[in-house]
Image: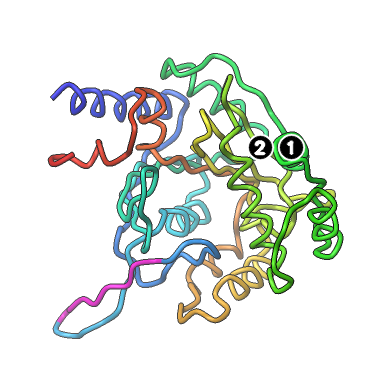
């Protein structure tokens, strides 16, 4: 019962933080006609009967696309606490269904959101300080590897430091194989923001000076947040969506692309709330929050 009350109070404090800062809380559909297209996330496809007709829809993997449509139309700071669903997720820190906090701030870049998250962590009593580390530095410090976006150079560096891999492995698979080991060492003494990701891992973030303007937050080796400066060019967003859905039977969200015809400069961030609560209260698994049967 105590955990149930703590979870309720936690959600209310998160809401209070954003409403007091002038954000408007919004609610977008969980069931959508288009899937979120993310290279590393698999949406849940469902079949529904609407007005006597069968149709395919998707459960949102995040409220990102729907919120961006709102941003295009209303152009104001917004946040949402939403149920999201991701196929194939399993483990201590993963689940098919979980709660996500997502918000967008107009006229700022990812650096503003790092400061804002620092204030959120302080407001929640989790931490009053944090540090910022680049991806390249994290690789060198925790894996002893010099990172390069050139695949052959990266492979040569891995070989030089004693790493073994199959020749057919590509840059992305090798990056994440090493990054999984790096992650365990992040945010141990204080929350740690990892910044300046390779362009290959930009997702929908803006590119600048050869890097993606996005960050990830870690606390005690657990990934908590993913934030970015939003790319606003329609053609570039379409190109990335096409790339992310290559080889997958996922329709393109034409409504979203139309929203980018008048899209405001902004930065956005998402936080897995069960994970944040887990590190806040020292829980072992997010499954402890699967009420009513933890």
Q: Which residues are magenta?
A: 43-51
Front residue of 141 and 17: 141
Within 10 Å of the Cα at label 1, are there few (<14), some (14-19), or many (20+) other Cα atoms?
Answer: few
Image quarter for residue 294? top left
Q: Position of residue 200 (x, y in %)?
A: 71, 60
Q: Position of residue 29 (x, y in %)?
A: 31, 58
Which residue corresponds to the image point at 21% horizontal and 25% vertical from the top-left? 3
Place of residue 115 in the rendered image (x, y in percent of width and height, measured from the top left): 61, 26
Q: Main secondary structure of the magenta part?
A: strand
With 102 as the anchor, is 46 left or right in this view? Answer: left
**In this view of the protein, which residue sits in the foreground, 137 or 257?**
137
Q: In the rendered image of this protein, does residue 224 appear above or below residue 22?
A: below
Q: Is residue 256 left or right of residue 135?
A: left
Judging by the rendered image, the residue that carries numbered circle 1 is: 134
In the rendered view, would you say 152 is above or below 81? below
Where is residue 288? Give x, y as percent: 25, 36
């Amino acid at each position: 019962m105590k955990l149930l009350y703590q979870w309720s109070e936690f959600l209310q404090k998160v809401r209070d933080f954003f409403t007091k800062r002038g954000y408007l809380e919004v609610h977008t559909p969980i069931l959508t006609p288009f899937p979120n297209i993310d290279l590393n996330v698999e949406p849940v496809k469902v079949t529904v009967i609407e007005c006597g007709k069968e149709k395919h829809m998707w459960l949102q993997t995040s409220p990102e696309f729907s919120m961006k449509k709102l941003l295009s139309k209303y152009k104001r700071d917004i946040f949402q606490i939403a149920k999201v669903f991701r196929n194939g997720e399993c483990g201590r820190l993963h689940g098919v269904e979980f709660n996500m906090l997502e918000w967008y701030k107009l006229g700022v870049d990812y650096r503003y959101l790092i400061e804002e998250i620092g204030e959120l962590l302080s407001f929640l009593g989790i931490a009053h300080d944090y540090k910022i580390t680049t991806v390249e530095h994290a690789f060198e410090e925790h894996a002893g590897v010099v990172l390069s976006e050139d695949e052959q150079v990266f492979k040569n560096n891995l070989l030089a430091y004693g790493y073994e891999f199959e020749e057919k492995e590509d840059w992305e698979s090798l990056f994440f194989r090493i990054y999984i080991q790096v992650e365990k060492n992040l945010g141990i003494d204080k929350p740690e923001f990892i910044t300046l990701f390779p362009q290959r891992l930009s997702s929908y973030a803006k590119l600048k000076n050869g890097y993606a303007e996005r960050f990830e937050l870690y606390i005690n080796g657990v990934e908590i947040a993913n934030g970015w400066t939003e790319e606003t060019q329609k053609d570039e967003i379409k190109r990335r969506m096409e790339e992310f859905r290559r080889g997958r039977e996922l329709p393109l969200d034409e409504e979203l692309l139309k929203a980018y015809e008048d899209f405001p400069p902004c930065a956005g961030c998402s936080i897995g709330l069960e994970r944040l609560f887990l590190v806040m209260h020292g829980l072992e698994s997010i499954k402890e929050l699967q009420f009513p049967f933890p």
